[in-house]
Amino acid sequence: MKRKILFVALALVCFVSAFSTREGYAAAFKSPDRTPCPRYEAGSILVEPKDLFSSHGVLQVSFTYETRVDQYGNTLYCYMSEDGSQSPTLHVYPGDELMVKLTNALPSSTTPSFQKHAMPGMGALPEFSISGQSHEASPNCGGMVMTDTSTNLHYHGTNTPPTCHQDEVIKTLINAGETFQYDVHFPLDEPPGLYWYHPHIHGISEAAVQGGASGAIVVEGVENINHDVAGLSERTLIIRDNLVPGAPNGDDVPAWDLSLNYSPVAYPEYKPVVIPVRPLQKQFWRVVNAAADTILDLQVQYDGVAQDLQVVAIDGVPTGSKDGEFEGRTLSKKHFLLAPAARVEFILRAPPKSVKSAMLLTLNVDTGPDGDNDPQRPLATLKVNEGAANPSLTVANVSAPPPLHMRFEGLAKAKPVTQRKLYFSEVLSDPTDPNSPTNFYITVDGAKPTLFDPDNPPAIVTTQGSVEDWTIENRALENHEFHIHQIHFLVLERDGKTVEGQYRDMINVPYWKGSGPYPSVKLRMDFRGPDIGDFVYHCHILGHEDSGMMAIIRVLPSSSPIR
């Protein structure tokens, strides 16, 4: 379905680029001595994002959301901080408060032909009783009308509240020229690890994320759960994707180009980023797949031989730390499949000087007959040098014992209150026209497939404190990637076979081959935390999400009956 989605993406890019240089934009929102959304040259030495740290339990950040068109005609987007740094890494601790003042510096749209949408969901929502007080859910948060310039922020993977001014994406709109204040409260039991932030406006999320609007969030403290990382040099790697200039045809052409920390690794040269390392040095790498659509399969090869990745955390949760019964456990992997939006953190030992070729690459991913072309290609070359500078960050030394209680404690042994089956599916909007756009659905088994609309009622209603088992099937001829906001889940089974479960917020569901059983995963969903209200689950291939593959879940307070 790549070409149909690409057509929509190109149309949006062309439209936005038409007004991205209007007079007054630079004077109003940015200093004239800097370029918004800067990019590095292909083959550059790796540049890591600036690091911002909380102090006394608070991290305050001011961002402007900016855009420009690059030399290839691609529309870029980014978050620029006051000092001119782009998409910095935000470091917090469990229990911290993240305060983000976000100004949308995109030029206002004045094109009358663009269909603007009244902010959906204007009807009253159920009253929730929180801490003894009655609160009526707000029908909107920020702007009232969605336009082509709308943005917001999603704090992906964090177990933070789905409320206005925190991690609410269904009804939060920040339009051109508007400033919005986020005040996000991280729970005291937030697992230490890697998360990220990006826009989440339904219908235009793919273009924004492919434009580069994303950054990492690190919840500190992983060294207290897995001592193996204590004192190691630390790197943050963010892999993004974007349109291939000119959209050439050919079996070898990837669906999307990639970049690493804003350095392009572009078709057809695939010139890798350079990472200087000292021989045999151990480093701790935190990797975000911030691509909108590209599935990665990461591997490190020394002279063509796959190396061990000592995995410490997946999707922000230290591996082997399920129930607070033992310290984190390091897993050895020769490669790691990283769905769009997924994260992996691992220890890597640099090669000796005798190695001639040391490479970080993504292997070929078979996404199905209707899927994208995600070929093998290099991402970075490890350049061994005795005098190589260490990364600017070093993991702290162990300062506390592992927590006595973990956020997901006891989930594996908990009794689910219900079993649900959901499935991914696709259909042409006009079955008689093979060139018509594709509609994408995620559906509760037995319900009618419905394209996402923020006005839709919740597809699932549950109660705070519940544990549920969900089986997610893929009935389409391409891969889909399941993600749910606000919570993590425990992976129980793949295709009916028990697996060693890890806690995740992202899971790949391979494509159906057209006959036989549908590929599936069984997940244990944990609604025992404090978060109540409406939030979403969807495919995190954002072209699919923008085309309808998303739905709402409502979590009622524990004292409320399911209605």
Image (cartoon, rainbow, N blue to C red):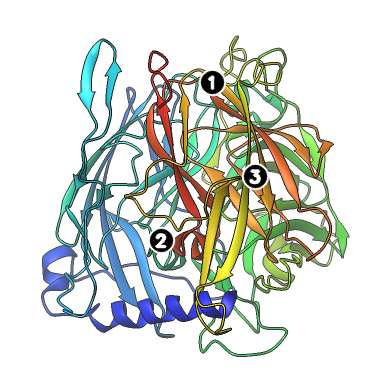
- Report, in whole angstroms, how far the alpha carbon at label 3 lies from the one at label 1: 28 Å
Residue type, numbered disc 1: Ser
Residue 145 image-quadrant placement: bottom left
Q: Secondary structure at mark 3?
A: strand
Disc on res. 344: 3
- Report, in whole angstroms, how far the alpha carbon at label 3 lies from the one at label 2: 23 Å
**Residue 453 at x, y percent in the picture:** 37, 54
| Residue that badge 2 annotates | 205
In the image shown, does 356 or 160 lie closer to the viewer? 160
Is 303 positioned to the left or the right of 66 in the image? right
Q: Residue at the spot x=43%, y=24% of the render? A: 562
- Report, in whole angstroms, how far the alpha carbon at label 1 lies from the one at label 2: 31 Å
In the image shown, does 488 or 231 lie closer to the viewer? 488
Front disc: 3 or 1: 1
Front disc: 3 or 2: 2
Residue type, numbered disc 3: Val
**Residue 360 at x, y percent in the picture:** 72, 60
| Residue that badge 1 annotates | 466
Disc on res. 242: none
Q: Secondary structure at mark 1?
A: strand
Which badge, 3 or 2, comes first in the chain's sequence?
A: 2
Is 321 positioned to the left or the right of 543 in the image? right
Query: Vertically, is 55 above or below 410?
Result: below
Is 108 positioned to the left or the right of 345 in the image? left
Residue type, numbered disc 2: Ser
In the image shown, does 174 or 509 lie closer to the viewer? 509
